[in-house]
Image (tube, rainbow, N blue to C red):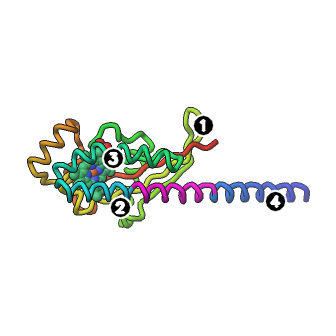
Amino acid sequence: MKTVTLMISLLCVCASSSAAQLSEQQQFEKEAQVAIKEFASSLKTALLSAMQDGGPIEAVAVCNLIAPTLAAEMSKKHGMEIGRTSLKVRNPSNEADEWETSVMQQFETRLSSGEAIQSLAFSEKVDTDTGQQWRMMKAIPTDKVCLSCHGTKIAPPIQAKLDKYYPDDMATGFKLRDIRGAFTVSKEID
Ligand code: HEC
C-alpha cells in the first residue's frame, strides 16, 4: 500500500514538473515569436523601401548594412539573441552551428513530406558550456521578391555587387517557396 502511494505521488511530481516545463517552453516560444515577427517585418520594410529607392543593386548595400544592425537592435530590445541563418549562407557570419544545421535539415524533411512551409518551427531546451538555453527556429520561405538576389537567374549588375560584398556567397539558386533559411533565437536560462 505504502509503495503504491509513493508511486502515485512520484507520478504526480513528475507529471506536474513536466507540465511546468511545458508552460515555460510555451512562454519562451511566445516571446520568441513576437521578436521574430518584429524582426521579419522591419527587415521587409527596409528591403522594400531600399528596392523602391534605388532598385535591387542599391538594396544589396542596404541589406549588407541594415540586416546585421537590425538583428543587434532586436536582440537587445527583446533580451534574447535573434538572427538569421541558412544551410547556404550569403554572409559567413550568419553561418549555422550544429544545432541550427540539424533543425534546418529537419525542416527540409518536413517540407518534402508535405508540411506547410509557414508552420515549420521548432524549439528545445539545449545544454551549453555555461548552462542551458531555450532555442527556437522558424523557416523563412523564398518569395518572389527574394529571387532577384537569391534566385537562379541573377542580373549581372546585381551579381557584380554580390561578388564584391560576398566573395563566398552560397545563397543563390533558390526557387519560389524553397526554404531560404530560418530565424534563430536563443535565450539563456538563469
Ligand atoms: C537586394 C537583394 C536582396 C533581396 C531582394 C533579398 N535579399 Fe536576402 N540577403 C541579401 C544580402 C545582401 C544578404 C546578406 C546580409 C548580411 O550581410 O547579413 C542577405 C541575407 C539573407 C539571409 C541571411 C542568411 C545569409 O544567407 O546570410 C536570409 C535568411 C535572407 N537573406 C532571406 C531573404 C528573403 C526571404 C528575401 C525575400 C523576402 C530576401 N532575402 C531578399 C540580399 C537580398
Whether residue 88 is visible to the viewer of this picture, yes or no, is: no
* Callout 4 amino acid: Ile
Secondary structure under the numbered disc 1 in the rendered image: loop
* Crowding at mark 1 (Cα within 10 Å: few <14, some 14-19, many 20+): few
Q: Which residue is mark 1?
A: 131
Secondary structure under the numbered disc 4 in the rendered image: helix
Earlier along the polypeptide chain: callout 4 or callout 1? 4
* Callout 2 amino acid: Leu
Q: Which residue is mark 3?
A: 67
Q: Which quadrant does the N terminus fall into?
A: bottom right
Q: Which residue is mark 4?
A: 8
Earlier along the polypeptide chain: callout 1 or callout 3? 3
- Please name whichever residue, 55 or 158, is drawn nearer the observer in this view of the structure: 55
Residue in the picture at 18% in, 49% down:
58
Q: Is mark 3 within 8 Å of ligand 1?
A: yes
Q: Residue furthest right?
A: 2
Q: Is residue 128 magenta?
A: no
Separation of residues labelled 2 and 4 (CA atoms): 42 Å
Q: State the extent of the magenta-drawn residues as a range.
A: 24-39
- Please name whichever residue, 87 or 73, is drawn nearer the observer in this view of the structure: 73
Earlier along the polypeptide chain: callout 3 or callout 4? 4
Nearest to viewer (mark 1 / mark 3): 3
Image coords of residue 105 (percent x, y): 37, 50
Q: Are marks 1 and 3 in contact (CB under 8 Å)?
A: no
* Callout 3 amino acid: Ala
Secondary structure under the numbered disc 2 in the rendered image: helix
* Crowding at mark 3 (Cα within 10 Å: few <14, some 14-19, many 20+): some
Earlier along the polypeptide chain: callout 3 or callout 2? 3
* Callout 1 amino acid: Gly
Q: Which residue is mark 2?
A: 111
Image coords of residue 106 (percent x, y): 40, 53
